[in-house]
Image (tube, rainbow, N blue to C red):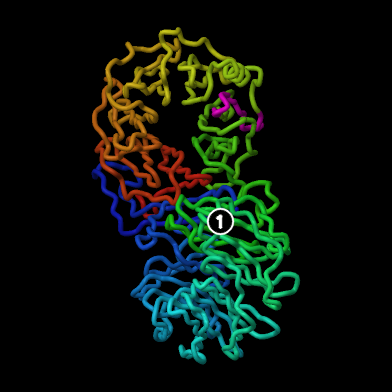
Amino acid sequence: MLSVFVVTLCGMSFHGLPDVAVPFVDSPGWEVRWTRWGGRQLACSPVMGAPIPPEYTRGVAKVATAVLDDRPVAVTGAETTVRVWDLATGKPVGDPLTGHTGGVSAVATTVLNSRPVAVIGSYDHMVRVWDLATGKQLGDPLTGHTDWVGAVAATVLEGRPVAITGSADTTVRVWDLATGKPIGDPLTGHTGWVGAVATTVLNGRPVAITGSADTTVRVWDLATGKPIGDPLTGHTSGVRTVATTVLEGQPVAVICDGNCRVRGWDLATGKPIETSLTGHTRGVRTVVTLAVATTVLNGRPVAVTDGGGATVRVLDLATGKPVGDPLTGHAGGSMLALAAAVLEGRPVAVTGGSDGTARVWDLADGADGGGEPAGGGHAGVIGAVTTGVLDGRSVVITGSADATVRVWDLDTGEPAGLRLSGHAGEVRHVAAAVVDGRLTVVSGGVDGTLRIWDLATAGRIALTGQSAQAAQSAQAGGIGEIHALDTAVVDGRPIAVSAGADKTIHRWDLATGDPLPPPPASHRRWVHALVTTTAIDGRPIAVAGTRQGSLSIRDLTTNRDIAPHPTGRHGKPIRKIAITTGTDNRPIAITSSNHPREAVKVWDLTTGLPTTELPTQGAQALAAARVHGHPVALIATGHTASVWNLTTHQQIGPTLSFPNPITALTLTPAGHLIICTDQHTTVLTTGPNSA
């Protein structure tokens, strides 16, 4: 599934010299043209390229789902702010809901007077009701609790929508949402704070199930306010979360406690379900399960739970066994909140994490433990990206840790060919060239092989040539892992240029796949970064980074260094290089060592010396291009990307934030920013009002 997001970063000015005609220099903001999700993830809020709201930097702690104007939405809480997100697009709906004077501690949704509403509990001891269509608070806050509100659920009692709240004051309260008044006296019996509430129907009567820090679960008849049966006991730690579903025709509760133990209870008998729920991969005494939800997957009831850390598990309630692989994607930390919904007819989970994002997961895709990733995306981290032209249309080419190469239409994000597979390990490098008038891709991986792909036929070229040679050399302890890869044209024929663990720059004929003569032993050295260009005297060269932090220049016609190898130390070893030309047509290189305290350097290639530094340290990915005649750099540091004018050495526009670390990027002469994070590829362009 393709999620298309359009995000404009308003209120941020883009500054450049008056004569600079780069389209995005004076643009009011960036637009996310498309995002291609990998794995089973369908969306992320905030979306790629949009800054994480300040209140979300400490995590999305609560989440619920609803339907607004016939579209599924998520309602998320972080700090004192509540936001509504469109699940299909990942975009926010309306302005944030503000007004709580304490942090948001509980979120539920229901329908009041035919309008979807959110019921929000807070550390300010109050409960507020919000109209999701207007973003306005309905009535006065619901007051009565004497401590923070730990849980909220909603149901219908005698034809009227009601909310059930649990609090750290150990009580449970029932509220008439139409009047804002409590119904009956507080429900008492728990001896610890009440942090979990769910509702269901038992023997035709609406009931509430509450979980407490006193390690017990209680079932309440909402019509009478009386407990039903004895408390459900057996948990050895405070009950964190409760969800309900129907299993074999009987209402059941799924309960998680602070020891990460997940148990199912038959509510009709008050007995635990004999099937144990497994699947959490860390010790039961080291992980706190913070969230659980239930839904139906392929006709079977399942529980969706925090699998420990930043993962989510789906468990079959009838068998107690995991369904498919864990869901991963939150950038470290932990998953704090979880809800279930239906999106375009498919069951999905919505999770909130300590990374400040809410994410949407396709539960049906991969439920059999295999198959194509959701949306046809990569199933592993994307480590390489480049662009080309295929059949007259611009395409994006990505290489991934799933050992495949994929091709995408730059304009639409749709697949533009078959998945290219054959590597035995992670693909870390991709480069493109035109061979006999056809777009050809070269890929290099940790398996020590280079592969050449004819995109017109999706076939590999010359398996007895370059790929076999690289494989044989690797087996003999020769080339080993590929460190750098690019393409060039030498004497009219396209070649691939690679550097590997054997400290040798190799050349390969792309038409035949055959290796070209290697350099003499005196011209072999450590290379972790390499880019080809014709910007110096018009001849094809490779610019390589050295261990001493300097640049060496290799004549690709002879495979020999043009000048004596630089001596002395100029900085940390260079691991990333990008090249473009300035407004005076002088070749410019930018380099990074990946060192957290070393800035990106700008070099004049005609002198081989650095000219300045950009105030970005620890850059893990670089790209450069002439955009409408002006030199521009795209630099990634951690979760952020920034664009720089290489004439003025000033940043262009705001820093772009992403929910995952950036793993690969490139920049096109038309001004497209192509940024890969984890399994996702995002293409950004300038806003509609750009020059």
Residue farthest to the right, as pictured:
248
Q: Residue at the location (33% across, 31% down)?
A: 590
Q: Residue flagged by tag 1: what amino acid is it?
A: Val
Q: Residue 39's spot in the image, x, y percent?
A: 58, 48
444 drawn magenta: yes
Relative to 100, does residue 409 appear above or below in the rendering? Answer: above
Picture layout, residue 150 above or below residue 543? below
Q: Position of residue 531 (x, y in %)?
A: 42, 25
Q: Is residue 91 magenta?
A: no
Where residue 619 appears, as percent x and y from the top left, is 36, 38
Residue span colored magenta: 443-459
- Residue 512 in sight here: no
Image position, residue 85 (x, y; %): 48, 65
Residue at 58 percent across and 36 percent down: it is 405
Q: Which residue is mark 1?
A: 284
Q: Residue at x 57, y 19 (%)?
A: 474
Element marked by disc 1: loop
